[in-house]
Image (cartoon, rainbow, N blue to C red):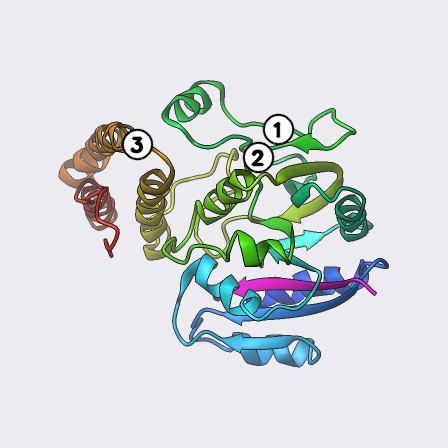
Amino acid sequence: MTSLTVSIVNYKTPQLVIECINSLKRFAPRLASMRVIVVDNASADDSLALIGAAHSDVQLIDAGDNLGFAAGNNLALQDCESDYVLLLNSDALVDDGSLDHLLQVMQNNPQVGAVSARVVNADDGQDQDYPARFPSLLEMFRRALSGPQFPAHGQQDPVVMERLHGACMLIRSKLLNSVGLLDDGFFMYDEDVDWCVRARQQGWQLWLIPQARVLHHGGRSSGRSPSGRASSPTLSPTALRMRYELRRSRYRLYRKHRTGWELLLLKLCTDTAMLLACVRPALHYLTSQQRKEALALLQANLKIIALNPFDAEAP
C-alpha cells in the first residue's frame, strides 16, 4: 500500500498541533497508510508531553534547539522511506477528502513532483493570499500595487505554479534524493520557494489543486498574520525577529537564484522601505508614551538595514 509521512514542526503551539493531528486522523487518507512526525524546535514548554499524551502513536523528535522550519522538517524527512511526504504547518487543519485528492492527483500524474491544496482562513473559509510566482523585483512591485493573489479562485482543474505554499505541500519522496531536502540556511520563509525552484529546474511540475483545502490559522508561531490579511502591528520579540528573518531569507534566495545586480537592487529597495518605516516609530519615540515599543521597532528596522546581502553566514 502507498505510504505517507506527515511532517509537522512545532514551536510553542502544542494545542494547535494536537488539533492539526486530530484533523489528520478524522480525515485520514484511504489511499495511503499514514504516519505523523512532530519535530519540536526547543519550545521550552510542555509541548512534547502534551502532544504525546494526546497522540501516543505519533513520533516525536526533540530538535534540541530552535532550528527553524526548514531544518526542523529535515529532521523528519532525512531518513523517510514513505512514498510521499506532506509538509503541514502546525496551525493548519486538513479538510474532508483533501489528502486523498492530493494523493490521487500525484498517482495519476507522474510528471508532477509536488502538489498543494488551496489555503483558506480557518475562521471563515475564505481564500488566503497564495503567491503564485517567484518573488522577483518586478513581481514584488506588482504585488505591492495589486495586492493578494488567489490562483485557485474559480478554478476546477489543477493550476500549474512556479511555487507552492509550504503550509501544505505534498512531495514525492524520490524527489528528496534528486532535488534534496529543504535548505536549512533558511531559518523561516522562502525555503519552500527555493525548493520549488530546484524542483522545476529538474523538469518537475508543481500543481495547486483547487478542490483540496487546508484551513490555516496563520502566524501563531511567527507572530505574523496570514499573508493578505490585515492586522494590527505586533511588536512581540518573535514578530520582530520574523521581520528580520524574512529579509535575510529573501537575500539568500536571490543569492542562489538571481544575479548580483538583482540582489543589489533588492538591498536598495529593502533599505529604502526600512528607512521609511523608521519615520513613524521615530516620531512615536519622541512624542508618545510608547517609547519602549517604538525603540524596539526602530532597532529591528536598523538591524535589517545592517544586513549584508552577500554574506551567507549572516546571523
Task: Please report the residue visible at 56 percent of the width from the left and 65 percent of the height from the top.
Answer: 77
Q: Is residue 60 above or below residue 131?
A: below
Which amino acid does the dot numbered 1 rest on?
Phe
Q: Provide the residue designation for mark 1.
A: 150
- Of labels 1 and 3, the one closer to you: 3
Q: Is residue 303 above or below residue 43?
A: above
Which amino acid does the dot numbered 2 rest on?
Tyr
Task: Please report the residue visible at 21 percent of the width from the left and 48 percent of the height from the top.
Answer: 311
Residue 33: x and y in percent read: 79, 66
Residue 223: x and y in percent read: 43, 51
Q: Provide the residue designation for mark 2.
A: 130
Left or right relative to 136: residue 170: right
* Real-space CA distance between mark 1 and mark 3, rounded to the nearest whole angstrom: 29 Å
Task: Please report the residue visible at 42 percent of the width from the left and 39 percent of the height from the top.
Answer: 232
* Real-space CA distance between mark 1 and mark 2, rounded to the nearest whole angstrom: 6 Å
Which amino acid does the dot numbered 3 rest on?
Thr
Q: Determine the secondary structure under disc 2.
A: loop
Does the stretch in magenta take in 287?
no
